[in-house]
Structures are given as C-alpha cells and as structure tokens.
Image (cartoon, helix red, strand yellow):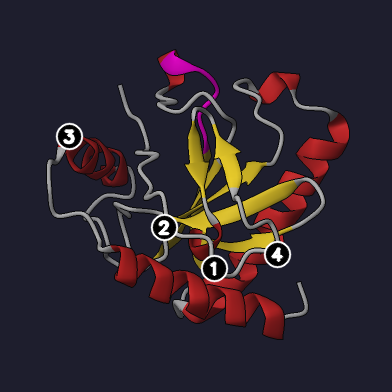
Amino acid sequence: MHKIPTLFLLCKAVVSTQSTGYKFGPHLIKGSCVFWESALSFAFVNLRPVIPGHVLVSPKRVEPSFTRLQPNEVADLFQGARALGDIMKEHHGTESMTVVVQDGPLAGQSVPHVHLHLLPRQPGDFPNNDDIYGEVERVDRRRGGDRTLEEMEREATLLRDLVERAGL
C-alpha cells in the first residue's frame, strides 16, 4: 500500500495569528510550523519531507474524510493548494508538482484529518515517476533522522515570507 507520511513536529507557537495552533487529527500543529492560513485552511511544513518542499495543506475543521468536506471547504483547500503550488514551484525552480490526497486508511491516510501533500518535482528526482511512492513508504518506516525544530521553523519562516510577498 502506498502512503504519503503525515509526519510533523509539534512546534512552538511564535508567528501564527492563532497562538494555540491548529488541530491536525489528534495532534496540534502550532504557529511556528504554519506558513499560510485562510478562513478555512492552513499549510504547514513536514517533519520528514520525501523531497525538498514537501508540505501539507489541511482544512481547519477536523474531518477525516475528503468526501465529507463542505463544498466551501473543498474550494478553499484546493484554491489554497493551487496558489501555494505556484509559490512552491517558483521557489524550487520547477514546473511540476505532485499533489496527493489520501481518503481513509485503505488509501494510506495515517492521520484522520483531510490533508493535501504538495511535492515540488525536479527532473530525475526519481528514476521512474511513480518511484516516489516507494520512497514515501521508506521514509514513513524510517526511525530517526527527523529534521530539527530549528530547521522546520526556518523553512516555515522562509515560506511565510514568500506567501506574504505573493499577497496570499
């Protein structure tokens, strides 16, 4: 079964307008790892990115199933992902991005909260395009080697600056 890891770090709240952070399934994502938010969605950095720039976008309302999101939540989530995708592609110097949503445990969803994975792709980043899924599984099983809080906060700060410059 292919699944994208939904690993993250519970970061200190320092920047987000919501000082207590956001629920992500049973977890709390605090402000220093959040780099974008709208009325209904938020985006945050990943503890174990599969490739550089691998980030997550999620609705603020905790809902495990994509098919149970309200139409305005779906629109907000995908409009945010589209705009963030443009920023991520430009920042990472690429024209391509893999966007993944897993709806339920049989689809590989490991946190019971809808979320999109944005993965900016580079030429030759995987010998075969679908090899990304095998790498995702390897990273998901890996123990240790996680990014530090400081690394994640630096990335979130950089992305937050890019988002602000883009007027999002």
Nearest the camera: 65 or 157? 157
Report the residue marked by disc 4: 83
**Rendering coords of residue 142 (x, y %):** 14, 41
Which quarter shows the N terminus?
A: top left
The residue at the point 14 percent across, 54 percent down is 145
**Rendering coords of residue 100 (x, y %):** 51, 41
Q: Give the spatial CA distance, label 3 vs label 4.
A: 31 Å
Residue 38 lies, with reference to residue 159, above or below; the image says above
Report the residue marked by disc 2: 54
Q: Secondary structure at mark 2?
A: loop
Q: Amino acid at mark 1?
A: Val
Q: In the rendered image, is residue 89 in sight?
A: no
The residue at the point 76 percent across, 53 percent down is 79
Q: Give the spatial CA distance, label 1 vs label 4.
A: 24 Å
- Of the residues under marks 2 and 1, which one precedes in the sequence? 1
Packing grade of label 2 (10 A; few <14, some 14-19, many >=20) is many
Packing grade of label 4 (10 A; few <14, some 14-19, many >=20) is few
Packing grade of label 3 (10 A; few <14, some 14-19, many >=20) is few
- Tag 2 near tag 1, CB within 8 Å: no
Foreground mark, 3 or 4, reads 3
Residues drawn in magenta? 101-105
**Rendering coords of residue 164 (x, y %):** 69, 80
Q: Which mark is residue 141?
A: 3
